[in-house]
Amino acid sequence: MKNKKIQKKYIDYGLGFPVTILNAPLIKVRNTWALDINYNKYQESILILLAYLPSKLTGNELRFIRHYFEMTIRSFAERFSVKHPAVVKWEKKADLATSMAWTTEKDIRLFIIDQLIKKPSELQKLYRALEEEAKISDRVIKIDSEQIAA
């Protein structure tokens, strides 16, 4: 019996929003196919992709960011100089764009890179990429499984 396979396109909803994984490695566990990836690398890779995403963040993506950094709604609000009801409002948007001020969203994206990469050159690269405001549009988050291999 074959216990491993590669699926060309796998859509994962485990982070609270859809992520398309290309060439996803799957393993059969108790008669159920599951992703065979390093979940820590997966989450970090998705955070970096969100920082560079050319569209506005959604409520679910914002909640993922907050949870990843183990921040309460209040501590997240304080860190980004907003009131905690604003964070609650943004997260309630679910799969829709948060409509937060672009300056706040840029700060959140720069925070991600600062926490994960800690290279001044990467912060500068992202800052320049964010000079133009992200657009609200339909988009797909895609990642190649080689980046998140177990």
Image (cartoon, rainbow, N blue to C red):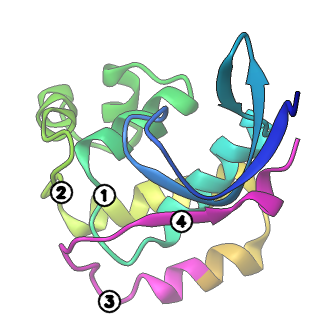
135 left or right, relative to 124:
left
| Residue designated by label 3 | 132
Q: Is residue 138 magenta?
A: yes
Identify the disc placed on residue 67: none
Is the Cβ of the residue at disc 2 closer than 8 Å to that at disc 1? yes
Residue at horizontal 14%, vertical 32%?
92
Identify the disc placed on residue 97: 2
Residue 65, how many percent across, how many down? 47, 40
Mark sitting earlier along the chain (2/3): 2
Residue that lies at the very extreme toward the front in this rendered image: 1
Mark sitting earlier along the chain (4/3): 3
Q: Nearer the viewer, residue 111 or 52?
A: 52
Q: For the residue labelled by badge 3, is the local secondary structure a helix, a strand or a loop?
A: loop
Residue 132, how many percent across, how many down? 32, 89
Seen in the picture, residue 137 relative to 149 is either above or below; the reply is below
Mark sitting earlier along the chain (1/4): 1
Is the Cβ of the residue at disc 1 closer than 8 Å to that at disc 4? no
| Residue designated by label 1 | 57
Q: For the residue labelled by badge 4, is the local secondary structure a helix, a strand or a loop?
A: strand
Residue at horizontal 41%, vertical 38%?
79
Three-letter amino acid code at disc 4? Lys
Q: For the residue labelled by badge 2, is the local secondary structure a helix, a strand or a loop?
A: loop
Disc 1 versus disc 4: distance between alpha carbons?
15 Å
Disc 2 versus disc 1: distance between alpha carbons?
6 Å
